[in-house]
Image (cartoon, rainbow, N blue to C red):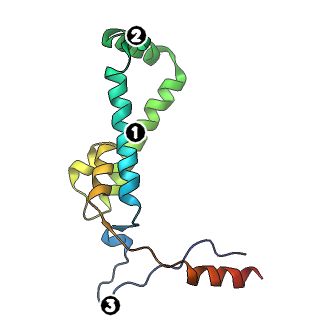
């Protein structure tokens, strides 16, 4: 069977912790945080300010929100997913020493802020991994 992941990096001598426990992330983390943050802020902005001729003014949007909240089961599933995401974000960021309490308890924006401030590790070379995986497949 092919190798699915690279082996865990060895901890630094005397540190006793792995790289992930120190709060380091891959180099592409900041790009993903920026894209996610941009999409989230655009969605919130569109909900309040976007094209009133299509969605009505803010009062009409609020009335639609209340109607969906009281009658649509799919809407409730989405709301519950968002609530569980918020709780899970608090749990996951609670185990990261560099995360602040504001980053833990502000859904979505706190996670994006944490990822933008996080240290990045250099990407490992894939040449050694590709030779190992090609030898194991033959």
Residue 108, horizontal then vertical, whole percent = 34, 43
- Is the residue marked by circle 2 packed among few (<14), some (14-19), or many (20+) residues within 10 Å? few
Task: Write down the residue under mark 3.
Answer: 13
Depth check: 25 or 52 in front?
52
Q: Residue at x 34, y 86 (%)?
A: 12
Q: Residue at x 28, y 47 (%)?
A: 110
| Tag in front: 3 or 2 | 2
Name the disc covering residue 66, or none: none
Q: Secondary structure at mark 1?
A: helix
Kindly indicate whether the residue at mark 1 contacts the one at mark 2 (C-beta within 8 angstroms): no
Q: First in sequence: mark 3 or mark 1?
A: 3
Residue 14, horizontal then vertical, whole percent = 29, 89
Looking at the image, residue 88 sits to the left or right of residue 125; the answer is left
Q: First in sequence: mark 2 or mark 1?
A: 1
Up the image or down, 123 lies above or below 88; here it is: below
Name the disc covering residue 39, or none: 1
**In 3D space, how far apart are the residues under numbered discs 2 and 1 (Cα atoms)?**
22 Å
Up the image or down, 6 lies above or below 91; here it is: below
Quadrant location of the N terminus in the rendered image: bottom right
Name the disc covering residue 53, or none: 2
Q: Residue at x 27, y 43 (%)?
A: 106
């Amino acid at each position: 069977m092919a190798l699915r992941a690279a082996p865990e990096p060895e901890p630094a001598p005397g540190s006793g912790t792995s790289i992930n426990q120190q709060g380091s992330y891959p180099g592409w983390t900041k790009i993903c945080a920026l894209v996610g943050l941009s999409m989230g802020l655009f969605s919130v902005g569109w909900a309040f300010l976007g094209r009133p001729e299509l969605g009505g003014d803010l009062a009409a949007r609020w009335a639609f929100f209340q109607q969906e909240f009281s009658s649509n089961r799919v809407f409730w599933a989405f709301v519950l997913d968002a609530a569980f995401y918020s709780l899970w974000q608090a749990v996951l960021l609670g185990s990261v020493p560099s995360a602040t309490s504001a980053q833990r308890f502000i859904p979505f924006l706190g996670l994006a802020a944490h990822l933008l401030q996080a240290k990045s590790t250099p990407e490992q070379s894939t040449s050694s991994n590709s030779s190992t995986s090609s030898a194991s497949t033959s």
